[in-house]
Image: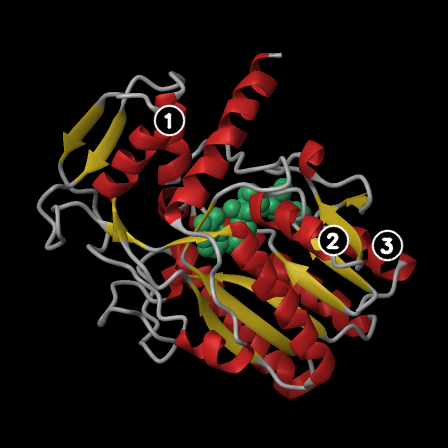
Amino acid sequence: MSRVLIVGGAGYIGSHNVKFFLEKGVEVVVFDNLCLGHQENVDSRASFFKGDLMNVDDLNAVFEQYSFDAVLHFAAFSQVGESVKNPVKYYYNNVVGTLNLLDTMIKHDVKRFVLSSTAATYGEPKEIPITEQCPTEPVNPYGKTKLVIEGILKDFEAAYGLHYVSLRYFNACGAEYGIGEWHDPESHLIPLVLQTALGERSSISVFGTDYPTRDGTCVRDYIHIVDLASAHYMAVEHLLSHAESRLYNLGSGNGFTVKEIIDTCKEITGVDFKVEYGPRREGDPATLIASHDKIKKDWGWTPKYDLHMIISGAFEWHKKLKELKSS
Ligand SMILES: NC(=O)c1ccc[n+]([C@@H]2O[C@H](COP(=O)([O-])OP(=O)(O)OC[C@H]3O[C@@H](n4cnc5c(N)ncnc54)[C@H](O)[C@@H]3O)[C@@H](O)[C@H]2O)c1
């Protein structure tokens, strides 16, 4: 593997993948319009190209300048609530943006692609753990955009010989390499809880305490971003040696309740912050846990980071981010 393009490489998951691929000795070019990303999080060893997926000239320029073994695509909007209120924003950026990218790839004869897909493609799960065979019935426009993209990929494979790996992540979390999660606004549980512990929020809200789970709060599957990155590296290695597409779940295979996350954050930070319990939020399934048996069986991938490592690393990053924001 010599050079990859990381689209959305200034974002949370993309910037960790940039580091992971660089550490493996792979040359990395980042394409990002910085609408949500942070250039400070892009390793200076990577070449940075400021461009927008909605601008085909930007895409052509990067593909004319470089040749790539593969493209990893992390750039998307991913706020579920916003996608319900403003689906046009999501269909344009996620679907049309990806279509522009794929079209440009084919024109430049680059035919290996890794997609950041999501557990939201499944919707309300019919069984736990969720396997790749489970029905895909997304319940919000965000999840639907990713399912549409997976459909486009199948058609591009049949028509143009593009090969892809679609990775359906569960809850990405943690921090490594001195960078971390930096969403604005933040909607993910662990950063919200840690910001509360650091006094940046007055309390943390818990939505629903009457779910059929061990303590009444929702159960989610948390997967560390370096475990995600190692799967992306395996995906590119696979595509380089096999002309065949794959689709996998990426989760830890374990579930933690919201209360368990809060308690672990309290234990790690040593801060007893305020927790407010409220009613359920519409559209939150009680439990989402991945089966990762398929990727484990095919590629030997297993997650290496447990919840303590995830929260400890994230806490170190959030302390640093607080300083960065106030300087
Ligand atoms: N964070 C999670 O838990 C999670 C879970 C499942 C799937 N995903 C998927 O993983 C991917 C990365 O998520 P993230 O949390 O790192 O998001 P992020 O918002 O931190 O990163 C997205 C990056 O894409 C860039 N971008 C967006 N639109 C662009 C455009 N039109 N042109 C160029 N760049 C553009 C942004 O500037 C940003 O740097 C997304 O596709 C998301 O749907 C994330």
Looking at the image, residue 233 sits to the left or right of residue 223; the answer is right
Question: As displayed, is residue 80 above or below residue 133?
Answer: above
Determine which residue is flagged by label 1.
Answer: 269
Task: For the C terminus, give its image quadrant.
Answer: top right
- Residue lying at 40% horizontally and 25% vertically, measured from the top left: 195
Q: Secondary structure at mark 1?
A: helix
| Mark toward the viewer: 2 or 3 | 2
What color scheme is it?
Answer: secondary structure
Label 1 neighbourhood size at 10 Å, few (<14), some (14-19), many (20+)? some
N-terminal of the pair, mark 1 or mark 2, is 2
Residue 100 position in % (x across, y down): 68, 62
Q: Residue furthest right?
A: 65
Residue 252 position in % (x across, y down): 40, 60
Determine which residue is flagged by label 2.
Answer: 23
Q: Residue furthest top?
A: 327
Marks 3/1: CA–CA distance: 46 Å
Q: Nearer the viewer, residue 220 or 93?
A: 220
Determine which residue is flagged by label 3.
Answer: 61
N-terminal of the pair, mark 2 or mark 3, is 2
As shown in the figure, which amino acid type bears the numbered disc 2? Glu
Q: Nearer the viewer, residue 51 or 176?
A: 176
As shown in the figure, which amino acid type bears the numbered disc 3? Ala
Q: Tell whether circle 2 marks a residue whose Cβ is less than 8 angstroms from ligand 1.
A: no
- Residue lying at 71% horizontally and 47% vertically, measured from the top left: 52
Residue 3 position in % (x across, y down): 82, 62
